[in-house]
Image (cartoon, helix red, strand yellow):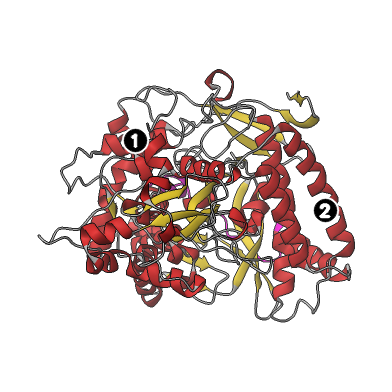
Amino acid sequence: MTVTETTASGQFHVVGADIADTKAPSGPIEKRWDQRQFEAKLVNPANRRKISVIIVGTGLAGGAAAATLGEAGYQVKSFCYQDSPRRAHSIAAQGGINAAKNYRNDGDSVYRLFYDTVKGGDFRSRESNAYRLAQVSVNIIDQCVAQGVPFAREYGGLLDNRSFGGVQVSRTFYARGQTGQQLLIGAYQALERQVAAGTVEVNTRHEMLELIMIDGRARGIVARDMVTGEIESHTADVVVLATGGYGNVYFLSTNAMGCNTTATWRAHRKGAYFGNPCYTQIHPTCIPVSGDYQGKLTLMSESLRNDGRIWVPKKAGDERPADQIPEDERDYYLERIYPAFGNLVPRDIASRAAKYQCDAGKGVGPGGLGVYLDFADAIKRLGLDSVVAKYGNLFDMYAQITGEDPYKTPMRIYPAVHYTMGGLWVDYDLQSNLEGLFVTGEANFSDQGANRLGASALMQGLADGYFVLPTTIANYLADGPFEKISDDHPEVVAAKQAVTDRINLLLSIDGNRTVDSFHKELGHIMWEYCGMERTEAGLTKAIGMIRELKADFYQNVKVSGVNEELNQTLEKAGRVADFFELGELMCIDALHRRESCGGHFRAESQTEDGEALRHDEEFAYVAAWEFGGDTPVLHKEPLEYEYVEMKARSYK
């Protein structure tokens, strides 16, 4: 039974029955993952060879899962839209990966990483998931070192650590500013080993465009060969989505331009719940926008906040160059407002603080949309060579993009869309509400709550791929192998036809506007009304604007070329069509959640000093959305906390 939930602005959704994570174990939190591993059913090695797995995505979550399941003996089909698994967006991660090793002997522990994750997520993540993530983290580093990942080392030979936002210990392992690249190479070589062994088949330049459901189970995908345009069906006993986040709904983000939501959105339209879509992370240290021509933004690693100091002029409208502003006329505002954490406050807090300074007229650079990230003190304290050794490639990248020397002039940074905490809803086993559909890494909603601490994305991706999924998926596959599905099965034929019809529709419109122009306009709406600050009036307006823009898209978009060739305009058109629907759901989710928490900041719900104000009595739940066209159905999963007290976050 559903009930209508109405805001002052009108009806945009209905409320369905509550849901629960039935797979999560009870008992002492430190024993729950061990308990689940023991209780999960196993598949003996001889039977694994008879079982097939489809994995979409070859980043850290997907690549690690394919390598691990292939090593275990399953028959794995891996898909990516890039020309190589090594081009997955995980390669772009810079600063590091968290693990509770306590090498610095500074008070870290599995429990502290768990606590920091729940607190950093503003008490909107599951305790069981966050604890498992912290628990598994210690194994990830050993796995990666064994693969040859060249983590930085300190003088004594131990792996080095640095700090990231939202914590007071050093637990972030890193490889200069190339951590994602080095970790992905590690996963890639493990994947290629299984390709050579014959357990994994990699399909590059293939984009998933539909999920095949048969008898209530996910049994395959429809993919388009992006070179020839051929529409292919692929079936298996189980499907895993590891396709990353949806930050490109904003057009400008730190994501690679190919990143999209199509795989998860197609699954959502087939019945998979979408969890917490409004939880998007704005990263505080990105190179500011330089013009309307830009197609993406560039991230400057959060690791720079270890030694760099963030400041603005104390006086509004001060346009003097940085080196002409004396020390007593600078406002190191994060150190002033948050003395306990200083420049290492969590990303959502640092981003809003930068916005407030710029809104007050203290921003620097073109348009006043920037703040300084200054390394002068670090160079004096540590020496130039030490700074070059730790951050050199990041400084070089900044210099190439801006034409400025960050060793001599402070970097200019401004917040930008980066990571998405929302994603397909999954249970403790990482299975969606659709049987046989598992979702890992950033593509699911499960571990980060309303805000992700820096260096925890790589941690979750590898935790899911190397350690969690291989255990939990076996529990499902123990009932297999399932009946083989032929290419002429009615559901397979129908799924392929749906893809063909959608492609033909896009090619037939023959309008007068480019796909990019629609995407850019959608992104502007999302950033303006569902970005760093949201209001009821703004979100209501955005929903109407998105619906009008979507209608215009299907009347006036121009998709040139044909399907039977390499056609990037067609690829973009399908992705943007899905972004319209996702953007609308994000705004509906943000409108219904009349509180501020983490990356979701409602202007109507803030403390006297501008901090996020939660309403735990009303909104301590996961919002799991069922597809319903213009009127989606909201299912609530209540969140309960036994080990961490729910209280207002304070980093002061």
Q: Which mark is residue 132?
A: none
Residue situated furthest top in the rendering: 617
Coordinates of residue 162 in the picture (x, y in percent): 27, 52
256 vs 367: above or below: below
Give the residues in magenta: 470-491
- Residue drawn where x is 71% and y is 53% of the image: 524
Secondary structure of residue under mark 2: helix
Question: Disc 1 to disc 2, how far (Cα)?
Answer: 45 Å
Disc 2 crowd rating (10 Å Cα; few below 14, some 14-19, many 20+) is some
According to the picture, the residue beneath numbered tag 2 turns out to be 549
512 vs 520: above or below: below
Of residues 467 and 610, the one nearer the viewer is: 610
Q: Amino acid at mark 2?
A: Leu
Q: Is residue 549 left or right of residue 369?
A: right
- Residue drawn where x is 54% and y is 40% of the image: 599
Q: Which mark is residue 339?
A: 1
Can residue 594 be seen here? The reply is yes
Q: Quadrant of residue 279?
A: top right
Q: Earlier in the sequence, mark 1 or mark 2?
A: 1
Q: Is residue 174 left or right of residue 477?
A: left
Of residues 62 and 232, the one nearer the viewer is: 62
Residue situated furthest left in the rendering: 156
320 vs 108: above or below: below
Q: CB atoms at circles 1 and 2 under 8 Å apart?
A: no
Of residues 146 and 311, the one nearer the viewer is: 311
Is 356 one of the magenta-colored residues?
A: no
Coordinates of residue 24 in the picture (x, y in percent): 42, 32
Q: Nearer the viewer, mark 1 or mark 2?
A: 1
Q: Amino acid at mark 1?
A: Pro
Can residue 239 be seen here? The reply is no
